[in-house]
Each structure stands twice: as C-alpha cells, then as structure tokens.
C-alpha cells in the first residue's frame, strides 16, 4: 500500500470556518479573535447531498458485481461479463446523466493500446479505455474527479472498484442541474491494478488540471469516519522552495500521494480500516472463511455518507476561487504583529480573503480571521506561535484549500 498523508474527516476539502473581524486597512493591525469552527451552508449543497441514496448505491453496485469482473485483461467483447460489458453499461449511465446538462456535458472514451514489455502486468497488446464525462462550468478552471473500475482475475469487486463508479453517474446528474462554475471531468479509470495506466494517461493529458478527488477501498466497519489522503510535496518543487517550506513547518511525515498527478493537486478518501482478506483477492471460501470483494461485506449506509463527503468536497472546490498567488508572511518585522501579502488569483472572482491558523502541534485549522479583499493585512498575533494559511473566498462562501505563506522581508510599516 502506498504511504499517504493522513487527515481526519472534519478537514475534508477545505470546509469553511466561521469568519470574524472587520476588514483590515493596509497599515492598521487588527486584534485576532478565536471563533469556533462551523460549517457554512453553500448554495444548492443541501439539494445535492439529499439525492445521495444508500438504496440507489446498492442497486448499482449489485449491477456492477453482476459483470463478474472488471479486470483490465478480461473480455472486452462479451456483452454480459467482464470489463467491456461493465464499461458499456457505465457509459450508458453517464449519457443518461448528461441529459440533465442542457448540452454542457459530453461523454467520451479515452483509449490507447498498452504494449507489453515495460509493464510486468501487461502480457499482450491491450486496449485501455477510461470513461470521461466532461461537464463544462460557467467559468472554466478545470477540476478532475476520478476512480478506477478494475480489479483481480475473477472478483466481483463490490467495494474496491464499485463504490465511486456507482456515485459518478448520479453525481454528474446532480451537478449538471445546478451548473457548477468550473469544469469537472468525472472519470472511471481502467488499468488501476496494472500500474494505474488509465490515470497516468489522463494525467499526461491534463497539464492545466487543478485538482483530483477519488475514493479508495472499504473493509472493516468504522461507520462514521473516513480518512483523507492528500498531496504532500509537489513534484515540481525545486530545492530552494523545499528548504524554505521545511524551515517554516510546511511538511508532513509520509510520502506524498503524487505518483499519478503530474504535479497537480489530488486528494483521496479511504476507509479507516482496510481488510485485505476482502480486497486484492479472488472470491473463494477457505476453512469456512469468505475471501474476496463481495457484496455481503458492504455497509450501504456508510457508503452513502462517504458519497456525501465526496460530493460536498467537489461542490466546494468547483465553485471556489483559485488559490491566492505569491502569498507571503513578513519575517523581518521587529514587533509582535504579523503581516501578510498576496496577489489575486486568476479565474473565478475573489470576494475576500481569510487567514486561518492553528497551534504548531494541531492537525486542523482551528481559527479564522476574515480580512476582506485586501492585498496587505496585519494581525496582532505572533508568527512564531502558530502555523498560518490563507484562503480565497468566493461568492456564496466557497473557499479554496488554504495556502501556506512564505516569508518575505519589508520595512516596519509594510
């Protein structure tokens, strides 16, 4: 299993914090406050989340299981069994979802032939086809959401590969009705067990893509928790930036989840307890113990709750502004105030900015200060005692993930 950075559920994809304090002027320091963390209701979020149904999820998972396997090397021409039949059925589901988009959603296959030789899992030339449904946003920065529908030789793959494949078509339909601001690609990848071939191919095609959300495997029950794995160090980071980031506390304790992201951001939700007798196994019974990824092990209520977390995270990200650029924190001031600077991001308009912070030993942002739509902001909070981040805040309260400010030098009254 790949090593990934771990976060608790409540940090999921930049859920917003309570805002406080009036707008700051350029040169006036403002006393910080300690608001409690509370969830803001985004426009249309309740409507979208209310349509995530355990009953519908169960029905579609059972349909996907009925294809027997979705292994990449299985039969692609059999209409009832294997990855070809599952791919055709999922494609039809996408196209049905696209009917709600008024022409803004298109469905296509991203196909290529993988040759043997440079991959131990591919034994003969094999067609790798991922399904891509593109929903054009009203104001067009890209977002990508993905999951791989593929698995072992003859495994039903009830949880490992069915979970997000089930949610994708219905999520397409929900989002299409409410017209998200940014473009989203809902993707069902092939080739996951053969070195994430579909994901790698799509990553090469999306140099401008800004984010990816996927859902991982399910096993032992923990009905109200989900892990969030997110990117650590960007692949494109140079040595100078690395040293600066490490010197100011911007690091984590595990390898970054960036192997297939071509330098852009990615997060992944995963069950807290994975049971390896129920995944990466052919379905079989040994000494009266059931092995394999079969329907009997699924908790459809839990699955629906995780679906709502995914939908909420994506809905926020697709409507939020981009991250502020050139975010800085003054490292040379001789008083106890902390000064920040930033440049406006491209794309969706930003209505204000928010400074969030936490104790150096805390895993989550615990406090937030709204500073308005300003380029420079001063607060009366010592920069040595906490870790800071800065959000862009758009219309409706949508926020991008917080950006770590890097030190800059300026005069006392910068």
Image: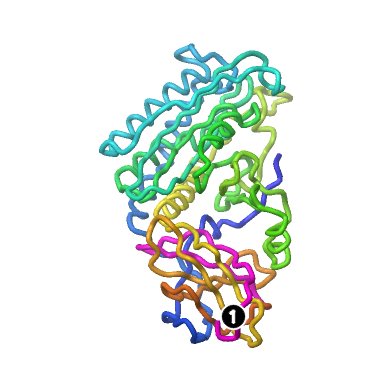
Crowding near the residue tagged with mark 1, few <14, some 14–19, many ≥20 C-alpha atoms within 10 Å? many
Instruction: Note whether 331 is above or below 322 in the view shown.
Output: below
Magenta region: 385-414
Residue at disc 1, secondary structure: strand
Look at the image and say whether residue 403 sits in the magenta stretch: yes
User: Is residue 278 visible to us here?
Assistant: yes
Instruction: Note whether 210 is above or below 376 in the view shown.
Output: above
Look at the image and say whether residue 230 sits in the magenta stretch: no
x and y, in percent, of residue 254 in the image: 72, 52
Instruction: Note whether 304 is above or below 344 in the view shown.
Output: above
Query: For the view shown, which residue lies furthest in the left direction?
Result: 102
x and y, in percent, of residue 258 in the image: 64, 44
Residue at image mark 1: 338
Give left or right: position of 107 versus 375.
Answer: left
Give left or right: position of 93 versus 102.
Answer: right
Q: Residue at x 50, y 20 (%)?
A: 67
x and y, in percent, of residue 92 in the image: 37, 25
Q: Could you say which quadrant of the image residue 196 lies in? A: top right
Query: For the view shown, which residue lies furthest in the front direction?
Result: 411
Location of the C terminus by quadrant is bottom right
Closer to the camera, 49 or 402?
A: 402
Q: Could you say which quadrant of the image residue 113 lies in? A: top right
Location of the N terminus by quadrant is top right
Q: Residue at x 41, y 28 (%)?
A: 108
Closer to the camera, 16 or 321?
A: 321
Q: Residue at x 56, y 49 (%)?
A: 265
């Amino acid at each position: 299993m790949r090593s990934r950075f771990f976060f608790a559920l409540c940090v999921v994809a930049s859920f917003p914090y309570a805002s406080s304090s009036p707008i700051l002027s350029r040169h006036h320091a403002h006393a910080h406050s300690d608001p409690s963390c509370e969830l803001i209701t985004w426009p249309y979020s309740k409507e979208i989340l209310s349509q995530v149904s355990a009953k519908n999820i169960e029905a579609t998972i059972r349909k996907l299981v009925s294809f027997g396997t979705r292994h990449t090397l299985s039969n692609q021409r059999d209409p009832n069994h294997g990855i070809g039949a599952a791919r055709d059925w999922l494609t039809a589901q996408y196209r049905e979802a696209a009917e709600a988009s008024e022409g803004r959603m298109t469905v296509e296959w991203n196909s290529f032939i993988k040759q043997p030789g440079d991959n131990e899992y591919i034994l003969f030339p094999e067609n790798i086809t991922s399904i891509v449904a593109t929903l054009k946003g009203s104001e067009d920065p890209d977002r990508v959401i993905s999951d791989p529908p593929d698995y072992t030789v003859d495994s039903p793959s009830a949880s490992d590969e069915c979970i997000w494949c089930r949610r994708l078509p219905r999520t397409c339909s929900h989002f299409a009705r409410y017209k998200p601001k940014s473009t989203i690609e809902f993707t069902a990848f092939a080739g996951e067990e053969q070195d994430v071939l579909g994901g790698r191919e799509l990553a090469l095609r999306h140099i401008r893509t800004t984010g990816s959300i996927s859902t991982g495997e399910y096993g032992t029950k923990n009905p109200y928790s989900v892990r969030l794995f997110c990117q650590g160090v960007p692949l494109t980071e140079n040595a100078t930036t690395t040293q600066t980031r490490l010197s100011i506390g911007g690091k984590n304790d595990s390898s970054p989840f960036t192997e297939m992201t071509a330098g852009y951001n990615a997060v992944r939700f995963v069950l807290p307890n994975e049971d390896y007798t129920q995944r990466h196994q052919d379905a079989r019974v040994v000494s009266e113990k059931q092995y394999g990824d079969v329907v009997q092990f699924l908790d459809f209520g839990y699955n629906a709750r995780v679906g709502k977390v995914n939908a909420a995270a994506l809905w926020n990200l697709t409507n939020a502004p981009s991250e502020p650029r050139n975010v800085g924190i003054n490292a040379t001031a001789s008083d106890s105030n902390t000064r920040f600077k930033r440049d406006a991001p491209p794309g969706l308009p930003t209505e204000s900015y928010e400074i969030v912070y936490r104790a150096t030993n805390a895993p989550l942002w615990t406090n937030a200060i709204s500073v308005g739509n300003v380029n420079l902001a001063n607060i009366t909070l010592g920069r040595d005692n906490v870790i800071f981040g800065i959000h862009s805040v758009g219309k409706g309260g949508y926020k991008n993930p917080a950006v770590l400010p890097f030190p800059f030098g300026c005069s006392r009254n910068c």
